[in-house]
Amino acid sequence: MTATGPSLRELIAAPHPDHAPLPPAAPSEPGVMELRGVPYAEVEGSRPLELDLWLPGARRTDPLPLVLFVHGGAWRRGRRDDMGMRTRHWSPRPFARIAAAGFAVACADYRLSGEATFPAPLDNLRAALRWLTLRSAELGVDTSRTVVWGESAGGHLASLLALTHADPPLAGAVIWYGPSDLTTVRGPFTPGDAATPEALMLGTAPADAPERARAASPLAQVDSEAPPFLLVHGDEDTMVDCSHSQSLASALESAGSPVELWTVQRADHGWYGLPDDQVERIFAHSLAFAHRLVA
């Protein structure tokens, strides 16, 4: 007798993220709902990739614009729901604030450099956008109005996503102190060093793989089709030199793409050294920028 149904291996496996039931939304901060640990992709030989969602709790009829947040951590560590050390004590939390302002917020895992090398993390973010688009009707989101927001290494990946993703194209990008160039000596970064976080992300010293380093450099991906960018960077950044954002802003401006560069005085990486009210001001300005892109 020939079996016609699913194989035992298929029956044992968890439902594929494309059609698995969504977890129930739970109340978060006042007026905000959360869906935590939602699988969005299966990667052969790797852990399932998950994202967290924050949604306004109020009943709505129109699809929500989306903020896709990309966490930092030198491509080596980090948590998808962490916007950086200066926001960890906030109440309401930063993603709840964005949701309360009328966005859906998705914070997605991506494979770290100990798991896979470039372009794996960028491919994972593309997969997250694909899944969010596929399930958009259930989630009540409009991924054609997506703003990608990233900090540090997440700012690097967010920049690449904004500059290279076309289906759907992104509405814009908010980038906090993100690397933009893996081909040139900048601050503490040296392309010939195989021990840097950049080299670990690439799988080799950038100088030994110039084509791959260029493909992983947002600065090299700028063209006239680039969406609007907000680049915010401390002028005393000791980990990612401020010239990364300055050069990216110049390239975007030369290409005729809208760009705003805010060089924050007396700020180190992760807004270290700034008073709390200045960090709040940077966040509020970034959120207002995102709102203008999807209004």
Image: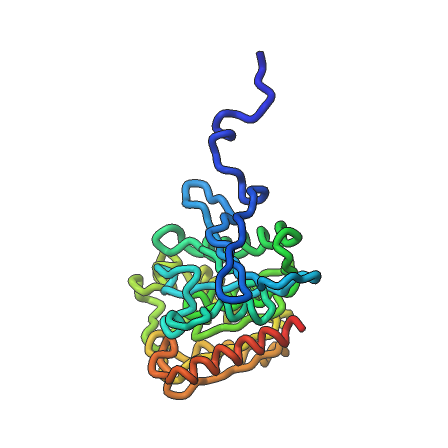
Q: Is residue 107 visible?
A: yes
22 above or below 279?
above
Residue 263 in percent (x, y) is at 46, 85
Q: Residue at x 43, y 84 (%)?
A: 278
Residue sitting at the far top: 1
39 above or below 280?
above
In depth, the one of 277 and 27 nearer the eye is 27
In depth, the one of 196 and 92 nearer the eye is 92
Q: Is residue 159 visible?
A: no
What is the number of callouts on the image? 0
Quadrant of residue 271 within the rendered picture: bottom left
Q: Residue at x 63, y 54 (%)?
A: 136
Position of 73 with respect to 138 (left or right) is: left
185 above or below 70?
below
Residue 249 in percent (x, y) is at 53, 79
Quadrant of residue 233 within the rendered picture: bottom left
Which quadrant is home to the N terminus?
top right
Position of 187 with respect to 130 (left or right) is: left
In depth, the one of 4 and 260 nearer the eye is 4
Residue sitting at the far bottom: 265
Residue sitting at the far right: 61
Residue 111 in percent (x, y) is at 42, 53
Q: Residue at x 63, y 73 (%)?
A: 293
Q: Residue at x 54, y 63 (%)?
A: 32
Residue 199 in percent (x, y) is at 35, 61
Which quadrant is home to the C terminus?
bottom right
